[in-house]
Amino acid sequence: MGRRHDMHRRMLARKGGQAVATYAPVTSFADKLRDAQATNRSLLCVGLDPDPARFPASVGSTPEAIVAFNRAIIEATADLACCYKPNLGFYLLHGALGVEALAQIRRDVPAHIPVLLDAKFGDIDTTSLGYARAAFETWNVDALTVNPFLGRDALDPYLVYRDRGIFILAKTSNPGSGLLQDRQLADTTTVTMAVVNHANQWNSAGNVGLVVGATYPEQMAEVRAAAPNLPILVPGVGAQQGDLAAAVRAGVDANRAGLLVSASRAIACASSGPDYQDAARAAAESLRTQIEAARIL
């Protein structure tokens, strides 16, 4: 024990005939995120997606080197980031070593900065309960990305952690996202906007956000208009070449905030040489400067 979730009072509730864990919140994810954004004057979310094949020689090229590499990137950017976002796939592919490296991230990231696990979980309620407990208790992350395709009951096991955040996929950054997300429903609402409308309804604890790619700034503006108070995770800048300035201008809320602009390879893989920490810092600082310039316009 001894980790942050020990400060919670765990109870059991019955939901749809299944036992789900509920927690009395200590501090909300939204408050923690706002504090980190204010402290570091940043909307930048640094992705931690380690690829040992691209590690510098001084770190090595084995799964055992993931912890050291992540720690170096965190140390180089901790005063520039408002959040860190490991993607689960980059850890699972290394088996037990990868899972151990994932668990280490929360211990290496400064306590005031949230960690958001990009896992896109979404399954029936009993399975989701296992995912939720793994993420929020075993790995002790502050937030998750989740898939709404199975409906509200599949998200309830995450929502009951009222001090943690969930970011619901609405309009993803990949080129094929429109196959389903842009489909119009019978009332002419797109699937994306139907998800946004439901997310507003599910935000009773103030712990719901959305995922909208920087590659689709026009839809970002539509989402922000429909969800003025939800935080938005913005993937797709950097390697995916999303329009950073347009996405930020379209996505900021009334306080010129409300975004987590995520970049992974553009920062962590800025160099594979001995200067990789300095290069990561320079890339993060450049992105933070661009985000700040866009959000004050």
Image: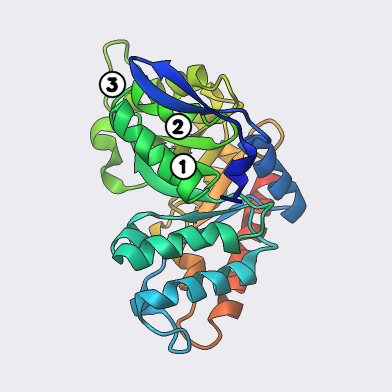
Amino acid bearing label 1: Leu
How far across and how far down the image is residue 156, in percent? 42, 24
Amino acid bearing label 2: Tyr
Frontmost residue, 238 versus 119? 119
Dot 3 falls on a residue whose secondary structure is loop
Q: Measure the C-alpha gap from mark 2 to mark 3.
A: 28 Å
Identify the mark nearer the N-term, 1 or 3: 1
In the rendered image, the quadrant that contains the C terminus is top right
Q: Which residue is mark 1?
A: 144
Amino acid bearing label 3: Gln
Q: How is the image coloured?
A: rainbow
The answer to whether any part of residue 3 appears in the image is: yes
Q: Residues within 10 Å of mark 1 (few under 14, many from 20)?
A: many
**CB of mark 2 within 8 Å of CB of mark 3?**
no
How far across and how far down the image is residue 210, in percent? 48, 34
Residue at 73 percent of width and 55 percent of height: 40
Name the side, left or right, on which 204 lies relative to 51: right
Residue at 36 percent of width and 74 percent of height: 63
Q: Residues within 10 Å of mark 2 (few under 14, many from 20)?
A: many
Residue 124, picture quadrant: top left
For the view shown, which residue lies furthest in the top direction?
A: 187
Q: Measure the C-alpha gap from mark 1 to mark 2.
A: 9 Å
Q: Which residue is mark 2?
A: 158
